[in-house]
Amino acid sequence: MESKILYAFTDLCNGCRACEMACSLTNFKEFNPEKSRIRVSRVVYEGRNYPVIDCDGKCPAGDPQCVYYCPTGCLVYVSKKQAVDMNYELAIKRQIQPVFKFIAPWKWKYPWRPWPK
Amino acid sequence: MPLVHAKYTVFTLVMTGKYDETIQTEEKTIGGLLDELNKKYPGFKEVFIPPEYKIMNLRTMITVKRVGMPPFGVVDPNTEIKDGDVILFW
Amino acid sequence: MTGKLYGWKGRILRVNLSSGKILKQDLPKDWMRDYVGCRGINARILYEEVKPGIDSFGPENKLIFGTGPLEGTPIGMGRVSITTRSDRGCIAEGGFGGFWGPELKYAGYDYVIVEGVSEKPCYIWIDDDNVEIRSAEHIWGKDTFDTDRMIKEEVGDFNIQVAYIGPAGENLVHSSLVLTDLCRGGGRSGCGEVMGSKKLKAIAVRGTGGVQIADPEEYGKLWNQIFQAHDHYNTDDHYVPIYSVWGSCGMTRMFSFTGSLQTRNAQEAEFYRIDDVCAEKYFEKYALRGTACFCCPYAAEGKWHEVRDGEYAGTKGKNMWAGSNFAFTALIGNANLAAAVKLVDECNRLGMDQYFVAYSIAWAMECYEKGILTKQDTDGLELNFGNHRAAVELAEKIAYRKGFGGILALGVEKASQKIGRGSDRYKLTVKGLELEMMPWRNLYQAALGNATSETGPDHTKWYPPYPSNPRIATPELLKELGLDLDLKSVFNTRTTDGKAKFMKFRYDSTTFIECLPSCVYMIRGRLGIDFRPWVKILNASTGLDFTLGEALEVGARVVTLERSFIVREGYRRVHDSVPRRMREEPLGAQFYEPLTQQKFDIMLDEYYELQGWDRETSIPTLRRLKELRLEYVAEDLKKHGLEVK
C-alpha cells in the first residue's frame, strides 16, 4: 500500500489556523500554537497563507485531525501520485468555476456547471 | 402554459451555470417546475425538497414576484404558478 | 470556585495613559459566574467605573478590550468586545474577530482597560509579562495598512497581532473603528474616536503561552459537533453553503429581489442595476483568495481583492462583505463595482465605518438632489446618486475633516442640525447612529431589534432575524428547551405578533454567545435554537456547571445592565424610535407599507414587558433587577434620581 503524505495546497489556505489548534489539542490537550506540528505563515499584505508542516501524518487520533478541521480542503492526506493529480484537477477546474478559488473541488459535493460567460 | 422567468443566485447559479432563464412550462405548480428543472440540472430538486422529508424548507428558498403584490416565499410545493411570474431560486 | 482556573486567565491589565502606570489585577470570581466574560464583564466594569455625564473624550472615560473563557480556543473565533462610553452618551460596544484576541489570551490577560489621556501619541506593547507604553509620534497620521507594517517592523516580529485606529479615529470622526488584521473592524458606535481621543494609536500583543481547559476530550467532541453543523455539506441549514463560500454578500441579489435592499437612501426597495454589482460579479472579477478569522469553519467570509484595470486600478485590500456590497452600491445608487471596492478599501485604510460613510453620502446626495445642498456647500462636488467619483473623494475628506467632509464627519444627526433647511427629514438615524442593512418596512423583527439596541442600530446584537429551520425546531424540542415561541408568526414578517417574544429570545441568546465569546454567525441550523452545545462547551472549558436557563439569564442580565447604563445617561423610550422615512413613506404599490408608530408601539410595549422594564420610560423595574441579582444597579439608579418602579 502506497504511503501517504500530508500535503497542503497553499493557494486554498485561508489562514484560519484551525489545523494548529487541532494538532495541539490532539497531542498536548491544550490550545497552544507553539506546540503544534503545523504552523501557518500568514502574509497579510498579500492575503496569502502558507501551511508549514513538520509531520508524517501519523496522528494519535487515527486520521489526521488537521485535515478534518480544514474548512477549505487545503490539507489532504493522500499518496504522492494523488496529490500530483489533485493539483492538476484544482488548476483546471478553477479556470471554469471561480468557487474553486476559495474551496477545493473535493470539498464541494453539490453538482456544478461552468460559470456563465 | 405559463411563461415564467427563473433567476438563479450564488448557490443555484453554480448548479445551473446561468444567471437566469425564461421557461415555457407545462407544469402548474412549483413542485412540478422543480421536477422539470431537476431533469435539466440533476440534483436541483433535492436541495429544495430533501427526499426524506417531502416538504420544503420553511426557510424560504424560493421567492415569487407577481405583478400587483409584494414578493412572497413559497412554502407549499403545490403553490400555483401564473404566467409572467418571476421566480428566484436561492 | 477554588483551585486552578481553566478557560479564563483571571487577569486584568490596567494601563493609565495620564500617569503611565501599569497595573495587573485579578478578575473577581463572582463576575465570572454572573457575567461569563467578553461583553458581559465589559458591561460590568463600564457600569461601575464610568460615571454618567462625563466627557467621553476626556481622561475619565475607559476603553475596555475584553475576551472571555473560550478565547484562544477554536470556538472562540478570536472575538473581542470593545466597550466604552460613546460621544452620544450611550454605550459604545463593538467587536472584531481576527487573531488579536487569542494572542492577548496567550500573553496571559483577559481584559485590557485603558484609562486617562496620553499627552503624546503612543502605543501599548504587550509581550507576555512585559508591558510598555511606547511613543507613536512617527506612526500618528499613517493609514491602517502602514501602521500594521510599521509596528511589526519596529518590534521585529511579523507574527505579532496589532489593534489600531486609522486617521479617522485620530481626528475624532464619528463612527470610527478599531481595526486589526487589515480589515476586521469593530466599534462603529464610538470606540475608534474614544481611542483617538486618548492619543492611543495601537495595542500590539505577542503571547507565547497557551490556553488550558478543564476537559479536553469533551471539548474535542463538542468542537466536532459544532463544526459539523457548519460544514457545508452536512449541515441542515441551507444558508451555510452560500455563506461558507460567498460570505454574507451572497445575499444582496436576493435582498434586491424581495424588496429588502435600501436603495438611494432607502427611498426605494430594489436596485435596478444590482446584476452588475452583485456578489457574483465581485467573485468573478476581483476576489482572488479567501481569508478567515481564527478557526472559522467557513471557507471565505473575507476575500482578498485586487482591481487590475479601469480607473480604480491598483486597489488592493480585503473583505467586501454584505454591508459593503449593499452600502456602496444600492444605497448611493452606484453601478460601478470597482468604485465600491475602492470605497471599501478607503474605509478600511482610513479606519471609518462603511455604513456611516455610505449613509452620510446618501443623505448628502438626497439633499443635493432636492436642492437643500448646493455646489457651494459641497465644495463643487456634484452629489447626484450614482456619482461614484464624488463619493470616493468625499470619503477621504470625511476622514481628514476637510471642507464639506468636516460637516459629514459629525455624523448625519449633527450634520443635519448644522445644515438645517429641512435636511433632517432625510436623515436615517436612531440614537444618533446611522442605520445598517436590515429593511425596516419588510422585516418587523429587525425593526424592533434595531430600534431597541442599546448602542444604536446594530444587527449583531440579535442576528439572525429568522429562527432556524422549523423542521428542526419542532414543538417537542421547544418544550424540551423550555422555550415558548411561535415560530410561524416570525415568518410572517409584516405582522406585529410574536416578534417581541422572538426578539427577547434572540437578544438573550446572542448576548450569551457574545459573552463566551463566539461569533454570532455561528448559530446556524440547529444551533440557532438549541443552545445546549454552547453551554456544554463552556462547561468543558471552564469546569463549571452552567445550565441552559442560567446561560440565557446571563444574556438577560447583560442586556438589562446595558439598558441601565443608557438610562442613567438620560435615554428613554422615546429614543427607541423608528426613523421618519420608515414611519411615513411606503415603498410603492409593488412593495411595502410604512411601519407606523402604532404598529411599532404594540411590539415595543410587549418587548418592554418581557424584559421587565417600565413601559413608559424603559427603566428596568425593581422586580426585574432583583431577579437578575442586579440590586446594586437599583441602588445606583435611585442615587442618580431615577424612579425605579
Image (spheres, coloured by chain):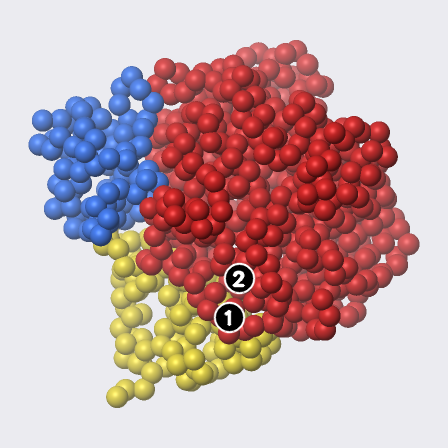
Q: Color used for chain A?
A: yellow
> Disc 1 marks which amino acid?
Glu
Residue C263 position within the rendered picture, expressed as x and y whole percent measured from the top left: 46, 26
Residue lying furthest bottom: A1
Of residues C189 and C506, the one nearer the viewer is C506
- Numbered tag placed on residue C536 in the rendering: 2
> Going from the N terminus, do you reach mark 1 or mark 2 first?
1
Residue B38 position within the rendered picture, expressed as x and y whole percent measured from the top left: 15, 46
Is C563 rendered above or below residue C529? Answer: above
Residue B12 position within the rendered picture, expressed as x and y whole percent measured from the top left: 27, 45
Decide if residue A104 is in sight here: yes
- Which chain is depicted blue? B
Residue drawn at x 25%, y 29% as measured from the top left: B86
Of residues C329 and C89, the one nearer the viewer is C89
Contact between labelled residues 2 and 1, with CB atoms less than 8 Å apart:
yes
Dots 1 and 2 on the same chain: yes
User: Is disc 1 placed on a helix, strand or loop?
Assistant: helix
Is C417 rendered above or below residue C80? Answer: above
Q: To which chain does the residue with label 2 belong?
A: C
Is C162 rendered above or below residue B85? Answer: below
| Relative horizontal placement of residue C327, taking residue C3 as reference (left or right) | left
- Quadrant hosting residue C56: top right
Q: Quadrant of the N terminus of chain C?
A: bottom right
Residue drawn at x 40%, y 61% as measured from the top left: C228
Residue C51 position within the rendered picture, expressed as x and y whole percent measured from the top left: 83, 39
| Relative horizontal placement of residue C400, taking residue C214 as reference (left or right) | right
Q: Residues within 10 Å of mark 1 (few under 14, many from 20)?
A: some
> Disc 2 marks which amino acid?
Lys
Q: Color used for chain C?
A: red
On the image, numbered disc 1 is attached to which residue?
C218
